[in-house]
C-alpha cells in the first residue's frame, strides 16, 4: 500500500511518532515506519525515548485542556443572546462536574436555586393575593 506522502519521504520525527503510537495509525504505515527507521539506522532506544517525550507532551496537553474546561463559564451575554442553548445545557446536562466543567456546574447550581426561590416566591405571593 502506498501512502501520501510516502513513508520513506517523511521526517524521522514523524516516523518515530508513527512507530510509537500504532493505535493512531494504519498498521501498514506503522510497519513501514519501523522498517524505514531501521534503514535510517535510528536506534531502538532513541525511538522509545522519543515516544516517552511525546507521551509526556500528550499528557501535559490533556492536563491543560482539563484546566481550561474547569474554568469555562457561562457569560452574561450567553443568557441574553443564546438563552435557549444555555437553558437546555443547564436543564439537560447533568454530567457537567463529571465532564470537568466545574465552574459551569457551580453556576448551574446557583442559577437553578435562584430560579426555584423566585418560583416559590411567586407561588406564595399569588396565594396571598387571592
Image (cartoon, helix red, strand yellow):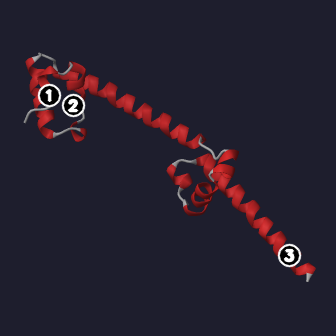
Residue in view at x 61 percent, y 58 percent: 84
Q: Is residue 101 left or right of residue 3?
A: right
Q: Nearer the viewer, residue 67 or 53?
A: 67
Q: Is residue 42 left or right of residue 118?
A: left
Disc number placed over residue 124 in the picture, else none: 3
Neighbourhood count class around disc 1 (C-alpha, 10 Å): few under 14, some 14–19, many 20 upward: many
Q: Nearer the viewer, mark 3 or mark 2?
A: 3
Q: Is residue 65 left or right of residue 88?
A: left
Furthest residue in direction top, as rendered: 41
Q: Which residue is mark 1?
A: 33
Q: Are discs 3 and 1 less than 8 Å apart at CB?
A: no
Residue 58 position in % (x across, y down): 38, 32
Disc 2 element: helix
Residue in view at x 16 percent, y 18 percent: 43
Cα separation between marks 3 and 2: 66 Å
- Going from N to C along the chain, the mark reached first, 3 or 1, is 1
Residue 111 position in % (x across, y down): 71, 57
Q: Which residue is mark 2?
A: 18
Furthest residue in direction bottom, as rendered: 130
Disc 1 element: helix
Cα separation between marks 1 and 2: 7 Å
Q: Is residue 64 above or below residue 118?
A: above
Figure quadrant of the N terminus: top left
Amino acid at each position: 500500500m502506498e501512502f501520501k506522502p510516502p513513508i520513506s519521504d517523511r521526517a524521522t520525527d514523524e516516523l518515530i511518532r508513527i512507530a510509537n503510537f500504532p493505535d493512531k495509525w494504519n498498521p501498514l504505515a506503522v510497519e513501514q515506519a519501523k522498517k524505514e527507521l531501521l534503514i535510517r539506522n535510528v536506534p531502538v532506544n532513541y525511538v522509545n525515548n522519543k515516544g516517552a517525550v511525546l507521551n509526556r507532551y500528550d499528557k501535559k496537553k490533556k492536563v491543560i485542556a482539563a484546566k481550561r474546561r474547569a474554568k469555562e463559564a457561562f457569560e452574561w451575554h450567553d443568557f441574553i443572546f443564546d438563552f435557549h442553548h444555555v437553558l437546555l445545557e443547564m436543564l439537560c446536562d447533568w454530567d457537567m462536574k463529571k465532564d470537568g466543567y466545574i465552574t459551569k456546574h457551580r453556576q448551574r447550581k446557583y442559577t437553578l436555586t435562584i430560579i426555584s426561590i423566585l418560583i416559590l416566591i411567586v407561588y406564595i405571593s399569588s396565594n396571598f393575593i387571592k
